[in-house]
Amino acid sequence: MDADSLQQAIREHLAWWGFRHFSSDRDYFAWQRRQLSSEELRQLAFHAEQKREGDHRDEIAFYDLTAHPRIYPVLYSQRYEYYEEIGWRTAAHLSQAKDILDFGCGIGVLTTFYARLFPEKNFVGVDRSSASVVVAQEKADKLGLHNLRFECVDVETQPLSGTYDVVVATHALVQAEHDLGLPSQSWRTFEREYSPAQQLSFERRTGLAIRLDGLCRVVNPSGRMIVSEKTRQLARRVPFQRALVNRELRLAERPTLIRYRTVEEAVEDGPFYVLYRGGEATLNWDEEPEQDQGQRFDPDADARSAGDVNVPLYENHWPSAQTAWEHLKDREVIRETTRQAPDGRQVHAERGISRSQHYLYCANTFDQRQLVIVEESRSAMLDEYYREILRGLP
């Protein structure tokens, strides 16, 4: 099937599950309030907070709750475009496989989609939420999918069984969504030295090591792995990729950045990787920041915004802000500060003048860059912004 046919098939499948696609937060949350009671919403908010702050047992409790038949169509309708985007991309890589594992399958939304598309192949869905596995198996039975079974396995305490031609793991390997990752060597660079201790620390605290090792044990020597995680930020992408490299996983094709919306919010997860084990590497891993649309500051071109109190002459929040800052003409620093933030990042803030324009530049070791330039008459706004940044630092 071509991409358009696969996308149409996943939409029909999501409709069968009872999911709805929304483009308006107002419409979605109005529907949510009609479908769920105030107590159900309270329980969801409570367990979501416990999941963020707790350990893997709190995560299991959250997913057990969300597997409730009244809750999952409403909650997971927010992820409609995620299922749509991941579903067709993964399905396009399954045609040559015989036995497929879907790790972290949840309630089986995508696993049942793959099994419907390929009735001649064997699928196993694995998740550590027992309530999710029960729902998944019930749905598979309703669809008459005899080529699909589900297992409740927590890889932190149990080994996976079987061997597979393809192992799929999306949003299932790196569970600590708020972990900042691996810092760069300083605020001036995006480069990261290789530190085995730092790498191991990242893999352990995010749960990546035990999950990835478990998958590597069950994928056939000539098999493939399809993985995608919330690793768009370079500080998370680099240690994630290094974990793959350390297990002799190689790129079968150039990674694709996954983009979708959760209702109105634009989401850029991280690359979609198709991997193989052993053999010679044909593609190189990329540890550079993503390409962005930022341009260098052009005093002549950007002066057109002068006089508009709501628009700076220039503003760049992308990695390219560093290059733009480096190329400012006749840069004169008025004041600057470099400190350690409470979360461990090194932060640099700089107020200065480039010819007749005033600028504020901010950078830190977790790849955030910002450059704002205004004319002299509005320089006070940069002074206040500079003080605000310092107030947030020890």
Image (spheres, grey):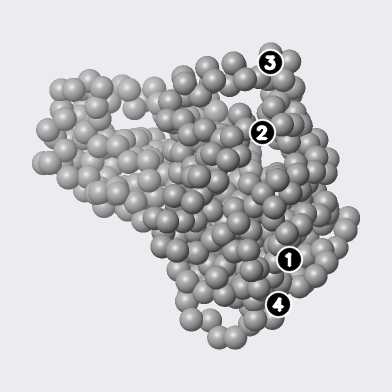
Contact flag, marks 2 and 1 (Cβ < 8 Å): no
Query: Residue 192's quadrant in the figure?
Result: bottom right
* Type of amino acid at the residue the image marks with label 4: Asn
Task: Rate crowding at label 2 as few (under 14), some (14 to 19) or many (20 or more) other CA atoms within 10 Å.
Answer: some
Q: Is residue 3 above or below residue 310?
A: below
Percent of width and height locating residue 264: 44, 31
Q: Nearer the viewer, mark 3 or mark 1?
A: 3
Q: Which sits earlier in the primary sequence, circle 2 or circle 1?
A: 2
Q: Which label number is shown at residue 220?
A: 4
Q: Which residue is mark 1?
A: 215
**The residue tagged with tag 2: helix, strand or loop?**
helix
Question: Which residue of the protein is positioned furthest toward the right in this rendering?
Answer: 157
Residue position for label 3: 37
* Residue found 64% across the figure and 68% down from its top: 120
Q: Position of residue 19 (x, y in %)?
A: 56, 35
Q: Residues within 10 Å of mark 4 (few under 14, many from 20)?
A: some
Amino acid at the residue labelled 2: Tyr
| Disc 2 to disc 1, C-alpha distance | 27 Å
Q: Quadrant of residue 40?
A: top right
In this picture, residue 225 sits left or right of residue 206? left
Tell me the SS state at disc 1: helix
